[in-house]
């Protein structure tokens, strides 16, 4: 949707009255926090925001925390610094769709961050809300780091968790670390915005997926340039991601 906030950002000659209107209009926006990409509040009554999506996934009622996260008292979701949710690494991971408030086909996958650009689709889903269905098998990429990717069939945007890999360099995905599930795994929720940040609503709920790692794994602290990974990827050619791929594509 059209974003008044963004459109106004570059206009420095606004009359005072108009500026006051803009300030009042966005008074409810979440405060900007260092290191965290701003998520705009949900304003579409047919969609759900992050707290509601977490409640659907984990139960209870999720309340906002001062640090940008949410908790239901048992399960706590803490935002991952957006400088760190770009490239992922380690362990064995399974990804499951949680929700999609996009009304269009979404293909979720990963791209190896080894300079090869090798991409693998994991699953596609095309169902609105919590009917979205799609799961990967358990994936082990050994020493290869990767970027998560989302390919939207309607906006024709294929975006990466690594903002620098997007043509616009926009950050299209925000991430929460989920603690309190008591299942011995490392769990993250990824919330995607699948359209232009110049004109989109920036509510980051077009596609939501849970990544659950067994063993150590998750976002790398600092994404390394491809050359730095060259010595770690000698086994990459032996990877058989295709064999792990399990499509549950749906047709609308
Ligand atoms: Ca991010
Ligand atoms: Ca959106």
Image (cartoon, rainbow, N blue to C red):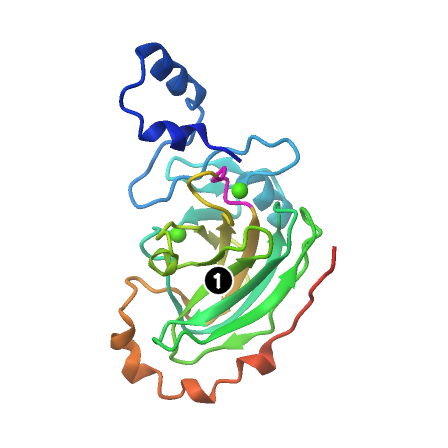
Please provide the residue range marked out in magenta: 200-205
Seen in the picture, residue 228 relative to 160 is either above or below; the reply is: below
Q: Residue at x 46, y 89 (%)?
A: 238
Left/right placement of residue 232 relative to residue 5 reads left
Q: Is residue 66 magenta?
A: no
Mainly helix, strand or loop, the magenta region?
loop
Tell whether circle 1 marks a residue whose Cβ is less than 8 angstroms from ligand 1.
Answer: no
The answer to whether 190 is drawn above or below residue 216 in the figure is: above
**Viewer can see residue 180:** yes
Q: Is 61 situated left or right of 119 in this image?
A: right
* Residue 235 lies in quadrant: bottom left
Q: At which x and y percent is residue 102?
A: 61, 46
Q: Quadrant of residue 54?
A: top right
- Taking the spot 54% from the left edge, 59% from the top edge, the residue there is 151
- Residue drawn at x 50%, y 37% is 201
- Tell me the element at label 1: strand
Q: Position of residue 13 (x, y in %)?
A: 27, 20
Is 203 colored magenta in this rendering? yes
Q: Quadrant of the C terminus?
A: bottom right
Residue drawn 36% across the image and 14% down it: 20
Counting the numbered discs, the total is 1
Residue sitting at the far top: 17
Is residue 182 in sight in this rendering?
Answer: no
Residue bearing mark 1: 149
- Assess disc 1: are there few (<14), some (14-19) or many (≥20) residues with their C-alpha within 10 Å of its C-alpha: many
Residue 140 rendering spot, x and y as whole percentages? 49, 78
Which of these two is toward me, 186 or 98? 98
Q: Name the residue at the right extreme.
A: 252
Q: Is residue 175 above or below residue 3?
A: below
Name the one closer to the observer, 154 or 41.
154
Q: At which x and y percent is residue 152?
A: 56, 56
Q: Is residue 215 left or right of residue 49?
A: left
């Amino acid at each position: 949707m059209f974003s008044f906030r963004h459109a106004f950002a570059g206009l420095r000659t606004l009359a005072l009255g108009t500026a006051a209107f803009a300030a009042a209009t966005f008074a409810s926006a979440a405060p900007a926090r260092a290191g965290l990409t701003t998520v705009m509040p949900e304003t579409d009554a047919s969609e759900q925001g992050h707290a509601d999506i977490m409640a659907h996934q984990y139960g209870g009622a999720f309340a906002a925390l001062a640090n940008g996260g949410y908790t239901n008292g048992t399960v706590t979701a803490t935002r991952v610094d957006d400088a760190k949710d770009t490239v992922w690494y380690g362990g064995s991971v399974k990804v499951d769709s949680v929700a999609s408030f996009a009304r269009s086909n979404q293909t979720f996958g990963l791209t190896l961050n080894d300079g090869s650009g090798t991409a693998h689709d994991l699953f596609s889903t095309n169902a609105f809300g919590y009917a979205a269905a799609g799961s990967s098998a358990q994936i082990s990429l050994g020493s290869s780091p990767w970027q998560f990717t989302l390919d939207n069939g309607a906006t024709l945007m294929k975006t990466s968790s690594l903002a620098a890999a997007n043509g616009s360099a926009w950050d299209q995905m925000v991430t929460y670390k989920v603690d309190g599930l008591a299942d011995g795994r490392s769990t993250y929720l990824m919330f995607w915005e699948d359209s232009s940040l110049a004109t989109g609503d920036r509510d980051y709920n077009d596609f939501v997926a849970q990544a659950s790692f067994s063993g150590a794994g998750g976002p790398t602290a600092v994404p390394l340039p491809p050359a730095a990974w060259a010595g770690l990827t000698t086994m990459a050619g032996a990877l058989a991601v295709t064999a792990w791929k399990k499509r549950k594509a749906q047709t609308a």
